[in-house]
Amino acid sequence: MKKRLIGFVLALLVVMIPIGAIATVSHMTDENKSAVHHEEHQEKSIGSLIEGFYKQTGIYAIFNPQEGAKNALGEEMSTFHQSFGRIIMIGIAFLLFYLAIAKGFEPLLLIPIGFGGLLANIPLANIIGDHGFIGELYKAGIANELFPLLIFMGVGAMTDFGPLLANPKTALLGAAAQFGIFGTLVGAVALSQMGVFDFTLQDAAAISIIGGADGPTSIFIASKLAPDLLGAIAVAAYSYMALVPVIQPPIMRALTTPEERRIKMKTTREVRKLEKILFPLTVLVLTILILPESSPLIGALTFGNFVRESGVVERLSKTMQNELINIVTIFLGLAVGSKLAAEKFLVPETLGILLLGLVAFAIGTAAGVIMGKIMNKFSKEPINPLIGAAGVSAVPMAARVANKEGMREDPTNVLLMHAMGPNVAGVIGSAVAAGVLLSIF
Amino acid sequence: MVLEALKYMVLGMGIVFLFLYLMVVILNWQHKLVEKYFPQKEEPSATPSKRDKLKKVAAITAAIAHMKKSN
């Protein structure tokens, strides 16, 4: 045994020594070369070296904006966007962190988006440009609408459509709430006509989809119709979704009487497993027949849901609900954050987007509640109009708000399961609305 | 342009309602079909519950007997 070991070491030495010798020799020649290389640069004094380095610092870039300097994407930037604009945007990124951490507003998205925005405003680094890592993420998944669809797949795998199947007609509430989208479209176009804003029809459509209260759908549409406005649209959509418990209750209370809020609904029937398995296929077939333009969104949603309900591919379903959606959320957030670069975000349009987005949310909520009142009048079974407000998607936040408002009037009135019906129908509704907008433009 | 947007609104809301209304109709129809051709099997759920009840009764009587003895 010992002999073998010694033999092995000797053999190793025989091989290694020549390799080592060759390496040393070649290294020495390398050193010679670099010495020659070095001599060419020695003309610079230490002062000019330091000055040259100073010109590469963020301090210099922020305080000495240059006329006609280009951003990471090769477009010219104004001096304001190079200097104070960046500082303001970094402040906004910190505001997003504050909202996410201290207030708990959609932290899963606002943290990556905020950090993406922070990185996007670093001067000279070109992180969001061609070869910058966020720029590459943007090209890989937002420019071609891939990431929102993958998120939709995860949403499908996480959503239980049981409450909708138990009482299908509540889907009409989810349809009514989409009025927020189309009502705002008309409003935005009218305001542009009057000269308040300067939005094209495409821009107006991309903004009004915020009323669908669905992050991935908003990003999907914005990246197709108005990529320049994507940052503001995504931030508005996710912020307002987080603000649902603040925005919706006053509208819901204003449109309903206490008696209406106290209406109790029949307990929902039990839903069979077979119905749940058939549901995604039924919706997909309907999409194919009526609106193939929505089939990327609805296709991804129904695929995720089919994987969930089929019950035989637990592993895939778990992956979509957790790992896949988490990874894509990180990429999506960072890539959307790249649109928070000062020259894209600090433009007058952003204010208009934030304002119109809020209006879209409010109109959607109101339309859902009013539809709830109408259905309550004509339906045999009582329908609490509060659940109409859950028709704007924002799953499951909007349904929880409807439940909470019902409990305020009557603590024994549990509306959660009833509100989940219009809530999940709202997801399908906004995907259909998105398809309609895509088919127009 | 506003007129154009109004047309989009009518078309959009029309299609969203049509889609979801058709969905409602088809889902109700699907529910009926499922109930008709794949009726719920009631028996397997009923028998074990009877057996369970008996088991519970036995457990309770045993417990009472045990308590009486220990007293």
Image (tube, coloured by chain):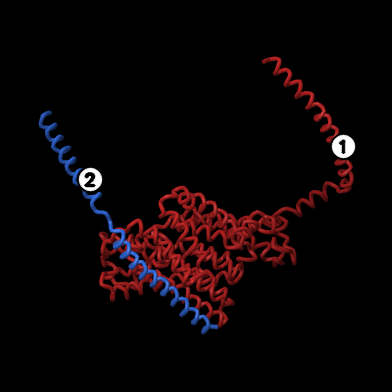
Callout count: 2
Q: Residue at x 40, y 55 (%)?
A: A309
Spot the residue most to the front.
B37
- Identify the secondary structure beneath mark 1: helix
Give the residue displayed 80% in from the left and 26% down from the top: A17
Q: What label does residue A216 carry, if any?
A: none
Q: Quadrant of the N terminus of chain A?
A: top right
Task: Where is residue A256? Give x, y as percent.
Answer: 32, 72
Residue at 85 percent of width and 41 percent of height: A34
Apparent side of residue A246 relative to residue A225 in the rendered image (left or right): left
To the question of a shared chain for discs 2 and 1, the answer is: no
Q: Nearer the viewer, residue A213 or A165?
A: A165
Q: Is residue A305 above or below residue A391?
A: above
Q: Mark 2 highlights which residue? A: B48
Q: Residue A365 or B41: which is nearer the viewer?
A: B41
**Going by the picture, which residue comes out furthest to the top?**
A2
What is chain A's hue in the picture? red
- The x and y percentages for residue A351 are 55, 70
Residue A303 position in % (x across, y down): 47, 58
Residue type at numbered disc 1 = Thr
- Expressed as whole percent of the image width and height from the top left, the position of residue A3 reads 71, 15
Query: Is A330 placed left or right of A44 in the picture?
Result: left
**Which quarter of the figure is the C terminus of chain A placed in?**
bottom right
Q: Which chain does the numbered disc 2 sit on?
A: B
Of A90 and A380, nearer the camera is: A380
Alpha carbon of mark 2 to alpha carbon of mark 1: how far?
A: 87 Å
